Image (cartoon, rainbow, N blue to C red):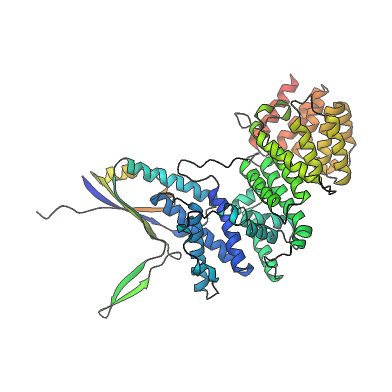
Amino acid sequence: MAEYLVLLHEDPAATRTLSPTQMQALIQRYTDWIGGLRTGGFVTVGKKLKDDGGRHLHSEKGKMVVSDGPYAEGKDIISGLFVVTADSYEQAQARLGSGPHLEFGWIELREIDAAPCA
Amino acid sequence: MPPRAPDARGLVADLFRRESGRLIALLANRTGVARIDMVEDAVQDALVSAMRNWAINAVPANPSAWLYTAARNALTDKLRRARFEVPEEFTQERSAEADNSFSSEHAFNDELLRLIAFCCHPSLMPASQLALTLRLACGLSVEEIAHALLTTPQSITQRIVRAKRELRDADVTFDIAPRELVQERLPRILNAIYLLFDAGYLSPRHPQWFRPLLCDDALRLVRMLAEHPLTAEPETHALAALLHLTAARSPTRVDDEGRPVPLAKQDRSRWNQAAINAGMEFFSRSIRGETLTRYHIEAAIATVHASATSMETTDWAQIVRHYDQLCESFPSPVATLNRVIALRYARGAQEALLALRASDELHAIQDTMVYHATMAELHEALEEHDQAAAAFGAAAELAESDTLAELFRRRARAVKK
């Protein structure tokens, strides 16, 4: 059994034009999807990231430089993250199944490397 | 009317749409007309944020409070970035989330009323008033409005942008003197609500011929107006009566296959008695003064139907008298057509058909589905099968809803046998 990091990527513009009614309906679909994952016992971490762009830390001439991350103007931002358990990428993909997210963005799936060096 | 039950996740149906209107009203009133686009954006941001957040973190105990805080914060942010003034109360208010008693249900009726009055400013065309009201106060998207008003989203967007610009250029504010509100603005607001209900109740040219959510909105708005001291006028009560009595028939209007059920076939025991009672109460309030509007007459007709247990025991003669008055004081093709229908039940199909043919008023709607459907029914009642079939066929051609078209084609086939 391995753990996989699931990053929900999206383009903020994709959801901004939805009507209030459509947005409320989407909550239902997301809740059903995530609820299904949780009920299956696959989710060990499930977090939504704040819609504020966060901060970017860089080094400039040896000093830390902090800048605001883009949000509304960004094209590809991470809105949430999960850690799910599965035996393989294929199984993780199958478990992530058919939620609504791919209609508005994409999912980055990365296996977490827990194996100690031999 | 009982409130809608929340769904399994605790979210009342239509919450987002209703909150959209209330929040825009509240925030726009606090920041002024010039910031209305910014307010709309902030409210949209809040809804998007809620959509993302509640799906992963669960719906909060007080969704309204959460949305208010999010919208207020988003707006404060935008105002600051543009270096505009931020209302003091925005920064001084403690988080509304912490206040479990926060409820926007009744809190913002004043603001909502002022917003609707703003949208129904006399310098705008009725079509623009309606589009602006539906967008800002009813939380419908541009696409949804275009669908309701049978036009394109581009046309609605243009209408709304132009309307906002005109109001800004004319320095219109949300402040409105009570006298002006009642005398000048109220008739237009009521007209917008009437049109909203009409669009939801029966749209012969819409793919979905009955949209209860639009009717619900109209009911909610008219109730708010009827209860607000500034707008609790006889005219308002008359419209409230009409809409409640009409909406009372909703449970029986649609059969299992989504087809309309005519009045003659509706199971009256399933009419919404609470709505009828509310309608009757509003009606008795509406006739206390001397005002007589078209809503009064239409409501009076609705009371006759609501009190009757069947078509046979309905006082059709009285209904015809009401239509006589309506056609004289507030003439319209639809009123004339409805009178023809009542005439058929009061005095027979022959006389009704004569009236249908003789009326000049009806020329304007000769190419509509309802006109041909009415003619078809009269011919059918008179056993004039060929004419009835032809008229049902014409009605089918003119219907833009598949359901209605199919209905009329079936009746055309049935009458030919």
Residue B150 appears anywhere in the view: no
In which quadrant is the C terminus of chain B drawn?
top right
Taking the spot 53% from the left edge, 51% from the top edge, the residue there is: B16
Which residue is located at x 68 percent, y 30 percent?
A: B261
Which quarter of the figure has residue B108? bottom right
Please determine whether, in this image, residue B245 is positioned above or below residue B79.
above
Residue depicted at 83% across the width and 49% down the height: B291
Number of on-image labels: 0
* Image position of B121 with respect to B386: above or below: below
Extreme residue toward the top, this view: B417
**x and y percent of residue B78 in the render?**
51, 69
Considering depth in this image, is B272 or B24 the residue closer to the camera? B272
Farthest residue, direction bottom: A61
Residue B333 visible in this rendered orientation of the protein: yes
Q: Which image quadrant for residue B3? A: top right
Residue B7, image x, y percentages = 49, 41
| Residue, far left | A118
- The reply, left or right, for residue B262 in relation to residue B384 is left
Depth order, front residue of B391/B191: B191
Location of residue B37 with respect to A61 vertically, above or below: above
Q: In this view, does B375 lie to the left or right of B265?
A: right
Q: Where is residue B381 in the image (x, y as percent from the top left)?
A: 81, 24
- The picture places residue B337, in percent across and down from the top left corner, at 82, 37
Quadrant location, the N terminus of chain B: top right
